[in-house]
Amino acid sequence: MKSTIFWYGLAMAILLGILKTVEYQFLLRDIRLEVYVGIVAVFFVLLGTWIGWKLTQKPEPLPSTIVEIAQTSAEPKPELVEKYRLSKREYEVLALIAQGYSNQEIAEMLFVSLNTIKTHSSNVFLKLDAKRRTQAVQKAKEIGLL
Amino acid sequence: MKSTIFWYGLAMAILLGILKTVEYQFLLRDIRLEVYVGIVAVFFVLLGTWIGWKLTQKPEPLPSTIVEIAQTSAEPKPELVEKYRLSKREYEVLALIAQGYSNQEIAEMLFVSLNTIKTHSSNVFLKLDAKRRTQAVQKAKEIGLL
DNA sequence: GCCAGAATCATACTTTTGGGTGATGCAAAA
DNA sequence: TTTTGCATCACCCAAAAGTATGATTCTGGC
């Protein structure tokens, strides 16, 4: 990160230098304004492109899960099972979700209303810190709940 | 895609408009040259950044690492893999679904539109005879695709 | 060159999920 | 007895997922 900042700074310095030079020549030889602006524009487009490229190189923010997946083989982790404690009903719902059943189907299987299943699954997602049922299933398998 | 081109065009139009406006004011009120150049520079840096970002989006066909990661300990069963033949893209999408990503996230990861992901996933469901993504994942694991 | 399959995307529509809020009843623990 | 956790359900709203259809582009193989 330090080096990144350094390079940005260096780029800025070079940039200002060039700007000044161009400006100087502008004053001296009365280059047409359009040409000047054009040069600046082209230069900054290039700079911007480079910045954009750089920005999209480093950051890999999304999949922290992938790393975890790569590390986990399949061992159940009792301490984590402890941590993400689900109630019995929640666990049932989670298990059925993992089998690919819809909320409606689960509701019928457990003889409760659709809304109840929604509540349970929402609670499961909360406890497992998941946004979707597929993610919940994935996390549960990682943890060893399933 | 059509809309993308539209937005490019719109951006260009707006850009030219602003440029002209700024230039006009420059001529009228004698804004300092540095200010003018600065505005142009900032604008083109932003434009360049955007272009750079866009450019670096396309040429990344996802280096199959994600797919590899998705492959768990279960050994693939060639005869079944044969039967439920998925295209490469479909397989990628399936793998990402299994990791708990939303269609939108997958679209961004693979740099395609949401609709494309929907098409792919629909095809996967068809081929795996699944009604939901969770079911597809479940079946794929049974079969040994994942 | 032509063709099939693959990948892409759009539009329009329906269904499923998920979030938020609030309410009730019940049972065990404090 | 009061509190607390659990299970149940409702209503509303928004977002995500899924279906259907049609179209374009590209590529590999014949």
Image (tube, coloured by chain):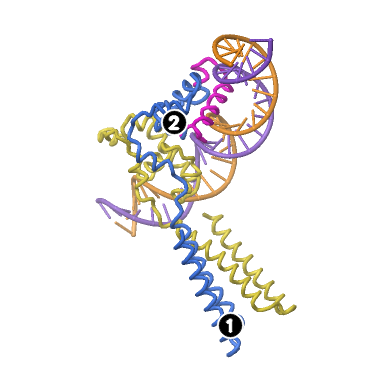
Chain colours: A blue, B yellow, C orange, D purple
Q: Which mark is residue A137?
A: 2
Q: Nearer the viewer, residue B120 or B49?
A: B49
Q: Name the residue under label 1.
A: A23
Which quadrant holds residue B33? Answer: bottom right
Of circles 1 and 2, the one toward us is 1
The mark nearer the N terminus, 1 or 2, is: 1
Residue A2: x percent and y percent? 46, 61
**Can residue B32 be seen at all in this image of the molecule?**
yes
- Judge if badges 1 and 2 mark residues of a common chain: yes
User: Where is residue A79, by image quadrant?
Assistant: top left
Q: Nearer the viewer, residue A24 or A122?
A: A24
Q: Which residue lies furthest to the right in this view?
A: B29
Q: Is residue B45 above or below residue A120?
A: below
Residue drawn at 48 percent across, 18 percent down: A88
User: Residue A9 colored magenta?
Assistant: no
**Label 1 sits on what residue type?**
Glu
Q: Which chain carries label 2?
A: A
Question: What is the secondary structure assignment of the residue under circle 2?
Answer: helix
Region rendered in magenta? A106-134
- Residue kind at label 2, given as amino acid type: Val
Report, in whole angstroms, how far the alpha carbon at label 1 lies from the one at label 2: 61 Å
Answer left or right for B53 relative to B9. left
In the image, residue A19 sits, relative to residue B50, either above or below, namely below
Q: In the figure, residue B24 lies in which quadrant?
A: bottom right
Q: Is residue A75 left or right of residue B53?
A: left
Percent from the top left, x then y, of residue D25? 43, 57
Q: Residues within 10 Å of mark 1 (few under 14, many from 20)?
A: some
